[in-house]
Image (cartoon, helix red, strand yellow):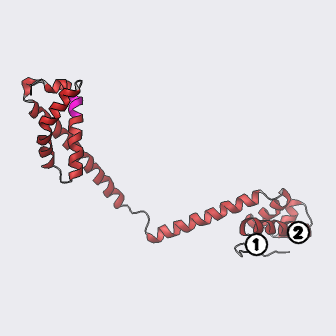
Amino acid sequence: MSTDAPLRIAHDPEAFEAFYRAHVEAVQRFVARRVADPYLAADLTADVFLAAIDAAGGYRAARGTPEAWLFGVARNVVAAEHRRAARERRANARVEGRRLLGDDDVERMQQRIDAAAQARELFAAVAQLPERERAVLELVALDELAVTEAAAVLGLRPVTARVRLHRARSALRRQVFDDASPAISPAPEAS
């Protein structure tokens, strides 16, 4: 193999193949001495040759043999992997050190998500109610006014407000709970 082979591997596929065949076992041994995982060693060996293609223009025969130059490339690739793995370990340690949610917290969060899904469904059903019925329902259920107070706010007679509230609740039960669920119980009506 000629001493200018590294210069040609970037643009000559045949030169790269010959260079690869001549040096792959040496690079594999180099990497295997520094990495315990065989899959990572295989990946890094491939990365060394990819990096060699990128660095081929910087090769200078006066500085050493092609194999020595390639070991320098391999050393940089392996060192970069060790730095990346160390950053990942530090990041994982920071996350592990901050366990934000315990098992009970996860269960409570799931309950909240489920409850929010039901609430979203309920709000969508409320939005479909006629304005007259929705207004009474919102004043009683959300603003916690008594039916007579809601009637006064809307300028209605209390009996009219009660009828509209009853219609709104019935419609919601049909839309959201199919008349089978006791999940929405009527709020106590104050006179």
Residue type at mark 1: give it: Asp
Residue type at mark 2: give it: Val
Q: Which residues are magenta?
A: 51-55
Circle 2 residues within 10 Å: few <14, some 14–19, many ≥20: few
Residue that carries the numbered disc 2 in the rendered image: 163
Cα gap from disc 1 to disc 2, whole angstroms: 18 Å
Which residue is more in the foreground, 11 or 129?
Answer: 11
- Residue at horizontal 10%, vertical 34%? 67
Give how far across and how far down residue 100 sits, in percent.
Answer: 42, 62
Q: Main secondary structure of the magenta part?
A: helix
Give how far across and how far down residue 85 sits, in percent.
Answer: 26, 50
Residue 52, magenta (yes or no): yes
Q: Quadrant of residue 10?
A: top left
Q: Earlier in the sequence, mark 1 or mark 2?
A: 2
Give how far across and how far down residue 181 sits, in percent.
Answer: 71, 74
Q: Quadrant of residue 23?
A: top left
| Rendered-image quadrant of the C terminus | bottom right
Residue 106 got which mark? none
Circle 1 residues within 10 Å: few <14, some 14–19, many ≥20: few
Above or below, 14 against 190 in this view is above
Above or below, 166 against 50 in this view is below
Residue 191, magenta (yes or no): no
- Residue at horizontal 72%, vertical 72%? 184
Q: Of helix, strand and loop, which one carries label 2? A: helix
Comparing labels 1 and 2, the label whose residue is closer to the camera:
1
- Residue at horizontal 76%, vertical 69%? 173
Give how far across and how far down residue 163 sits, in percent.
Answer: 88, 69
Residue that carries the numbered disc 1 in the rendered image: 179
Q: Is residue 163 left or right of residue 29?
A: right
